């Protein structure tokens, strides 16, 4: 279920105590709004999920979901660790002043430069994905003259009940060392027997937007079958088990995700049971939610423009953004809910399809939604756009990327400026002086 939107006396949508229509007038549209209180609540819920469980734990925010300087500073304030997946995300985190030792670095093809950068900055750990990366890290370790802290990303061979594009734990995934081929064991041996590595832990990530812990639990069980053998063969198991992210959220009224406490407990209990049954030491358990921290906190505001009805009686309402600020409907056929923010107290009168403004037939934000009669100039608010919205925004058709505003307790704060046309051509190099005519 989606949380009921809050509506003020003028019939306007309110976010974090701030009038959404005022926000659209002040900062322009399209506009990403984050309700900071919701981010705080989600972070606290994941931390509280571990509170009465007998394990040490770490909650890291997967910054790929939404990475900006202000967001990273908020994550620091909330006491979370941080997962980055590229040199750019790492740079953002470090520039935000995030403590390097609380960062770990993912990625299936990190470059030598990225690895050098991460290790030189003394980040907490590198999550190694493949043998090539192990080789690169040997070079880096030699250069800096000390061992590198690593986790190994393992692919447990567990499918996830989600869109194929965001499923990562299955045997044919591009991520990690496969348990099924014996690569995982080989990597484990390589990491253990080389003093250029300090093996901190093991990692898996099953997939994204999952509604139940079943796949995580299955992966834990699969993994421990293997770990029991590794323990007897190598005499040692690392201290940390990172079970990734993937905790689903409600995008629409029909979505029923599992709340953090009920998602985490079965996973931890599975680890405890496996360890008990095999007389193994219980590891520290790490998780790395991205979407679940920021998804529901985000709302995108658009201005409605053109409208047309097809011969088949389908009505398109077009907005001033689209697949450039929210790629998810085009990429994963994701569903969203929306309301007209300036008439949030009115009931639905018509069924429409919300189209983006990009030159692409697939640029449809919401297929078939019931709204009050939409007019040009109305403000459309699309909910739950906080994860992988701004993060996957792009400049197709040379649309500038929108601004981002944080709201809390009736206050608004601009945290990312809207791109300008000038920004769009910033890196373009001319063939000739545009002021000079060609003749
Ligand atoms: N850890 C690892 C290793 C991951 O690969 C991911 C997501 C996460 C954590 C965080 O997953 P989350 O808790 O946010 O589900 N662009 C897609 C999602 C791609 C997720 C990639 N990896 C989307 O918009 O749905």
Image (cartoon, rainbow, N blue to C red):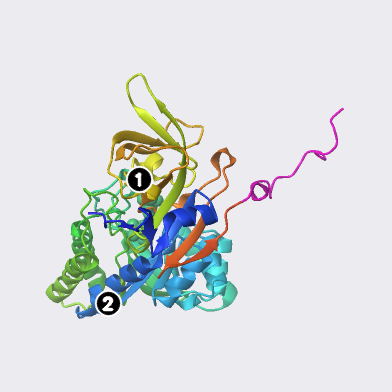
Identify the magenta region.
Answer: 420-439
Decide which of tag 1 and tag 2 comes sooner along the chain. Answer: 1
Q: Measured from the top left, where is residue 175 in percent x and y?
A: 38, 54
User: What secondary structure is found at the residue carrying circle 2?
Assistant: loop
Q: Say which residue appears at 28% left-offset and 70% top-offset.
A: 46
Q: Measured from the top left, where is residue 388 in percent x and y?
A: 42, 53
Write down the residue under mark 2: 235
Q: Is residue 100 left or right of residue 331?
A: right
- Mark 1 CB lies closer than 8 A to ligand 1: yes
Quarter of the N terminus within the rendering: bottom left
436 in the magenta segment: yes
Q: Is residue 189 visible?
A: no
* 432 versus 70 height, above or below: above
134 in the magenta segment: no
Q: Nearer the viewer, residue 240 or 136?
A: 240
Write down the residue under mark 1: 165
């Amino acid at each position: 279920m989606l949380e009921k939107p809050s509506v003020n006396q003028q019939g306007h949508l309110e976010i974090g105590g701030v009038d959404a229509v005022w926000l659209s007038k002040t900062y322009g549209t399209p506009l990403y709004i984050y309700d900071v209180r919701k981010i705080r609540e989600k972070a606290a819920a994941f931390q509280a999920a571990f509170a009465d469980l007998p394990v040490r734990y770490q909650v890291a925010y997967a910054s790929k979901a939404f990475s900006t300087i202000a967001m990273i500073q908020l994550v620091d304030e909330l006491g979370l660790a941080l997962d980055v997946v590229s040199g750019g995300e790492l740079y953002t985190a470090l520039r935000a002043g995030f403590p390097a030792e609380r960062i770990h670095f993912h990625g299936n093809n990190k470059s030598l430069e990225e690895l050098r950068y991460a290790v030189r900055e003394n980040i907490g750990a590198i999550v190694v994905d493949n043998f090539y990366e192990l080789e690169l890290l040997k070079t880096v370790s030699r250069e800096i003259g000390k061992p590198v802290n690593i986790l190994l990303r393992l692919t447990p061979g567990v499918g996830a009940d989600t869109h194929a594009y965001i499923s990562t734990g299955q045997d044919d995934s591009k991520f990690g060392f496969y348990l099924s081929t014996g690569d995982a064991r080989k990597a484990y041996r390589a990491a253990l027997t080389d003093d250029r590595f300090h093996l901190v832990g093991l990692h898996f990530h099953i997939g994204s937007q999952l509604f139940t812990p079943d796949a995580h639990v299955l992966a834990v069980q699969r993994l421990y079958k293997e770990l029991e053998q590794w323990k007897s063969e190598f005499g040692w198991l690392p201290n940390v088990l990172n079970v990734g992210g993937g905790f689903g959220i409600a995008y629409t009224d029909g979505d029923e995700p599992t709340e953090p406490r009920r998602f985490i407990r079965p996973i931890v209990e599975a680890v405890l049971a496996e360890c008990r049954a095999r007389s193994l030491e219980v590891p520290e358990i790490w998780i790395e939610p991205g979407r679940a921290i920021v998804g529901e906190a985000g709302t995108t505001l658009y201005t409605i423009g053109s409208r047309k009805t097809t011969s088949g009686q389908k009505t398109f309402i077009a907005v001033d953004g689209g697949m450039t600020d929210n790629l998810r409907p085009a990429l994963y056929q994701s569903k969203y809910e929306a309301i007209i923010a300036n008439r949030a107290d009115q009931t639905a009168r018509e069924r429409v399809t919300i189209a983006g403004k990009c030159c692409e037939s697939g640029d449809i934000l919401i297929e078939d939604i019931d709204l009050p009669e939409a007019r040009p100039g109305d403000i459309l608010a699309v909910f739950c756009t906080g994860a992988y919205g701004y993060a996957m925004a792009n400049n197709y058709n040379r649309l500038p990327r929108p601004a981002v505003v944080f709201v809390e307790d009736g206050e608004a704060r601009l945290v990312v400026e809207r791109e300008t046309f000038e920004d769009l051509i910033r890196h373009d190099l001319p063939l000739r002086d545009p002021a000079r005519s060609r003749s």
